[in-house]
Image (cartoon, rainbow, N blue to C red):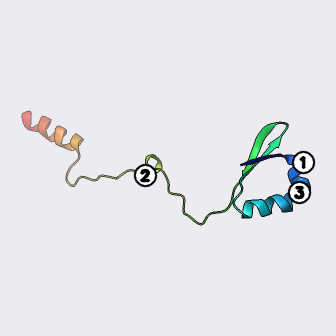
Amino acid sequence: MKTITFTDFRKKASGFITEVEHGESIVILRHGRPIAEVVPFTDKLQQTPSWKQPGINLQIQGSDLSSAILKERESEL
């Protein structure tokens, strides 16, 4: 991974893009802090981590719990 300043990137962008095409990753710095990472493009689909995927939506047939409790209370009277 190569690290360059933003000014150098602006001046020599075409050459750096060619390096990225050949598999090199580049981190761009501005005022000594990283602001961007240029990496080669990949056609692989990025999978969403399992903890970010929607959960299973469970549905129970029949009456809901509150209705069952109310019916039981009424039957006791």
Q: In the image, 20: left or right of 10?
A: left
Q: Would you place residue 64 above or below residue 41 in this image? A: above
Residue 20 in picture, x, y percent from top left? 74, 60
| Position of the C terminus by quadrant | top left
Residue 7 in picture, x, y percent from top left? 90, 48
Q: Residues within 10 Å of mark 3 (few under 14, many from 20)?
A: few
- Label 1 is placed on what type of residue? Thr
**Which element type, helix, strand or loop, lies under badge 1?**
helix
Chain-order first, disc 1 or disc 3 = 1
Of circles 2 and 1, the one toward us is 1
Q: Which residue is mark 1?
A: 7
How far, Cα to Cα, is label 2 from label 3?
A: 44 Å
Residue 65 in picture, x, y percent from top left? 22, 42
**As rendered, which of 35 and 64 lies closer to the eye?**
35
Which residue corresponds to the image point at 54% horizontal and 63% vertical from the top-left? 45
Chain-order first, disc 2 or disc 1 = 1
Q: Residues within 10 Å of mark 2 (few under 14, many from 20)?
A: few
Which residue corresponds to the image point at 50% horizontal and 54% vertical from the top-left? 48
**As rendered, which of 25 and 49 lies closer to the eye?**
25
Of circles 1 and 3, the one toward us is 3
Q: Which residue is mark 3?
A: 12
Q: Which residue is mark 2?
A: 54
**As rendered, which of 74 and 60 lies closer to the eye?**
60
How far, Cα to Cα, is label 2 from label 1?
A: 43 Å
Asked whether the residues under the numbered discs 2 and 1 touch, taking CB atoms below 8 Å apart as contact, a structural biologist would say no
- Label 2 is placed on what type of residue? Pro
Q: Would you place residue 77 above or below residue 58 in this image? A: above
Q: Residues within 10 Å of mark 1 (few under 14, many from 20)?
A: few
Count of marks overlaid on the render:
3
Asked whether the residues under the numbered discs 1 and 3 touch, taking CB atoms below 8 Å apart as contact, a structural biologist would say no
Which residue corresponds to the image point at 45% horizontal and 52% vertical from the top-left? 53
- Label 3 is placed on what type of residue? Lys
